[in-house]
Amino acid sequence: LVFYNDLRVATNCCFCLSMILGWENLTKETKLLEGSSWCRLIIEEMTVSFAAPALASQSFMNKQSPQVLIAIAVLKLRKIPQWMRSVFDSSSISGILDNLTASNLSSEILVLFRELLKSNFLTTEQIATINQILQECRKCIYTNNAQEGLPNEAIKKVLTASYDTGDICEFLIDLMTSEAYIDTVSRGFHKKLSEEIEMFYTCLSVDDGGCT
């Protein structure tokens, strides 16, 4: 379902999977990564798609972007799997950057590159390329001066302190069928992107990529 044609379904399922990875990170367990190759398959498919030549349209990047949430979650783990360096090798990262422009850059992709920066995946040349894209993106945002409405009401359902497996499944299914996450992303696009640009530069300014 993370590759489903319905962007809402794909986005919410990737969001749920990234949440599960986050929970495993908190409990210092990695059952999802150790017992299955699905995460690697998803991230490899995403990377190949992003790095494919002549596929830099905004609609294509948006369609593929849900899987970015899973890549971000894996990069945030206490122990990043060794295979991530094979998936995000220098040529793959450069291929993705070749397809990135100010018009198709999303906040999720920028978060991905921030996590890659923090984990020392990026070369000096790649950082310089990102910087150039961000400068162009800033100009576009300032020129458009986008007017955004208020985001939709946030998802009301939360997990209480005491819960069982059924509660977790119900919570995740509710997220998968909800419009809230994807609507919030689309409505606050320029604001979120501007915030992520500032966070990337903050991260870049810290010595040795030691940002948090």
Image (tube, helix red, strand yellow):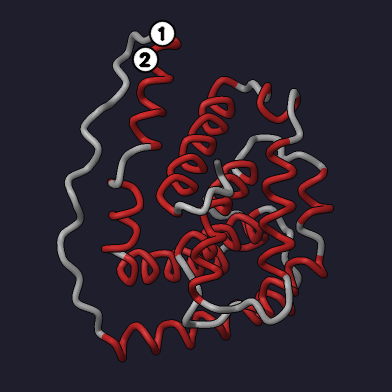
x%, y% of residue 27?
A: 56, 20
- The label number, if any, that marks residue 104 in the structure image: none
Q: Residue at x 35, y 52 (%)?
A: 182
Left or right, residue 60 beside residue 183: right
The residue nearer to you, when weighing 48 against 140, is: 48
Q: Residue at x 36, y 21 (%)?
A: 170
**How crowded is the residue under tag 2: few (<14 C-alpha within 10 Å), some, or many (20+)?**
some
x%, y% of residue 15?
A: 47, 42
x%, y% of residue 187?
A: 26, 63
Residue 144 quadrant: bottom left
**How crowded is the residue under tag 1: few (<14 C-alpha within 10 Å), some, or many (20+)?**
few
Of the residues shown, which amino acid type is indicated by label 1? Asp
Circle 2 sits on which residue?
167
Secondary structure under the numbered disc 2 in the rendered image? helix
Left or right, residue 160 beside residue 46: left
Count all numbered tags in the image, as a single digit: 2
The residue nearer to you, when weighing 136 against 101, is: 101
Left or right, residue 98 beside residue 60: right
Depicted 36 relative to depicted 39: above or below: above
x%, y% of residue 47?
A: 70, 60
Circle 1 sits on which residue?
164
* Residues marked 1 and 2 touching at CB (< 8 Å): yes
